[in-house]
Structure formats: structure tokens, C-alpha cells
Amino acid sequence: MKNLYILSLLLVVFALNISCDDDGGTSSKNLSQGALTNLTLASGSPEFIINSTFTNTELKFSVDLSFGDPESFDLKALYKTFGGEFYGPVTIDANVSSFPKDYVLTGSEVISAFTEINSVSDMNAGDNILFYAAFTMKDGRVLETLNNKGEPNYYASDFNQIGDNNYFLAYPVTCAPQPGVYRIEMHDDYDDGWQTNDDNGGNGIQLILDGVLTAEVGLCNPYVDSPYNCVGDYTDGIDTVTIPEGTAVALWQFPGDQYGEISFEIYGPNDELLLASGLGEAASGPLTVILCAE
């Protein structure tokens, strides 16, 4: 049996001035030095953007205060292209002095905020729109949650203990997928099949079409039964999935790689190489597989 690798994620977050006031074990936090928000999606709000229909889409979310005592905040947005360019940041709402505040932003409002975007034709699958807060503190300092490259602009070990807190929202841009048969070629360097989100087996690559899990593919393994119809000889295998005509959204999800032994390639209906994930490269989560319908 393989050794289980335990991975830990070290979070870095924005500095607060923290001090202990007495010897009795109690402490107090001086929150005047910083602040952080919690941004949450409203019920029914989309988690991603379909570029062709974005003009009439409504992005709904709430901005609340997690820590600190700011004078006000500005809601800002930053646009990151698939090629790595950044537009903005732009200010969506300014001088907000009460929490929480609910937002309903139409796609047309977001587009008009960026001078680089004239219409949905300028938005490509793989782009991202980031929303975050910039605080004005009571002493006049301005603190940005993200920098102009979309990177966290905050740090402090105390915030590592905060669960379920979103310091910013990221809306990935996608498109209606090209219909047809997609081919997935899968490999395992240890020659014992796939161990993904389980020490000895687990799930495969999942294809979710319009919110419904439609297909799942992966290599078989000699240890446990796979929860889907697996393929291959523990070293290599090929499977296909079909995206039907009229599909609005296709999401590809990878469950993870327990031992850094997995690699795979995904090809489009005309044998286009859409994604090549080298040995141990794919992290758990969405895969960037982009082929837009014509």
C-alpha cells in the first residue's frame, strides 16, 4: 500500500495590529490597522459567466465586514485575460460606509466599467473578473485587498483560523462548448492505475453539462472498485465523452492526484489538443478545457 501524503495549505492574510494587554491570559485586538471583507454569492446567482449571454446576466453578491473598523470601502473590479493581461482595477461603487451591502450588477454595467471591453465579443473563455474591497481607514490610509495583478495584499497568522471567508470573488468566463466526441488519454507512471481523491482509488475526471454530472472517466486500479466505468491496463487508457448540440456550459473537474503519478490529455472533436497535464501537474478542481461552439 502506498504512503499517504498529507498536504497542508498555508494561507497568508492581511496584517492587523495584535497585542496582549495583561498577564491573565486575555488579549485584545487593535483593529485600527487593517480590515477584511467577506463576499458571498446570493442564492441563485451564477458562479461563472457565459460570455455570449453576459450582457443580460445579473451577478448578485453581498459584501460584509469580517474584521476591522474602516471609515468606508470602495468595491473594485479587476479583469484578468486568459493570456495574462490585466484591465483595471476599476471602481464599481465608492465610499460605502455601512455593512453588509448587497449588489446586483448586470453584465452590461460591468462591461461599461472597463474601457478595454466594448462588448461580449471582447470576453474570452478562460478570462476572470475579480471583485474586492479597498478600505479607507479612519486615519486616511487606503488598504487594497488585492494588488493590480490580482494577488492577495494581506497577511497575518490570525486569519489562518478563519473558515468560509471570501476576501474576494472570482467569476471565470466560459462559453458554450463545441458539440461532439472528446477523447481523453490517461496515464499512470507507477503502473497501478489512478489514485485520485482516495488512497487506493477514487473518482475520475468528471464532465458536468449544464449543471448535471454527465460523464466520468479514469484508469482502473488493482486495489478497489472504481465508482464509474473505468478503463485501461493500470498504465494507460483511452475513453471518450460526448457533448451534445445545444449544451450551454461544460465544466471539467479533476478530483486530485494522491501520489503525483497521473498525467492525461484531452482532445476535441477534430483531434485538437485542448489540455495536456503532465505528470503530477493537475491540481484538484476545475480543468481549463476550452473549445467554444462556432
Image (cartoon, grey):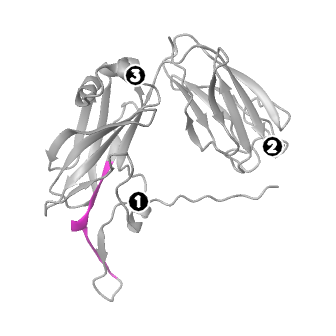
Q: Which residues are magenta?
A: 26-38
Residue 60 at x, y = what percent? 30, 33
Q: Nearer the viewer, residue 158 or 111?
A: 111
156 vs 66: above or below: below
Left/right of residue 31 with respect to residue 279 in the rendered view: left
Camera-near label (1 vs 3) is: 3
Name the residue located 25 percent from the left edge and 32 percent from the top edge: 104
Left/right of residue 162 with respect to residue 90 in the rendered view: right
12 vs 196: above or below: below
Name the N-terminal-most of marks 2 and 3. 3
Q: Nearer the viewer, residue 245 or 289?
A: 289
Name the residue located 65 percent from the left edge and 14 percent from the top edge: 270
Q: Residues within 10 Å of mark 1 (few under 14, many from 20)?
A: few
Q: Is residue 32 magenta-colored?
A: yes
Camera-near label (2 vs 3) is: 3
Identify residue for label 1: 162
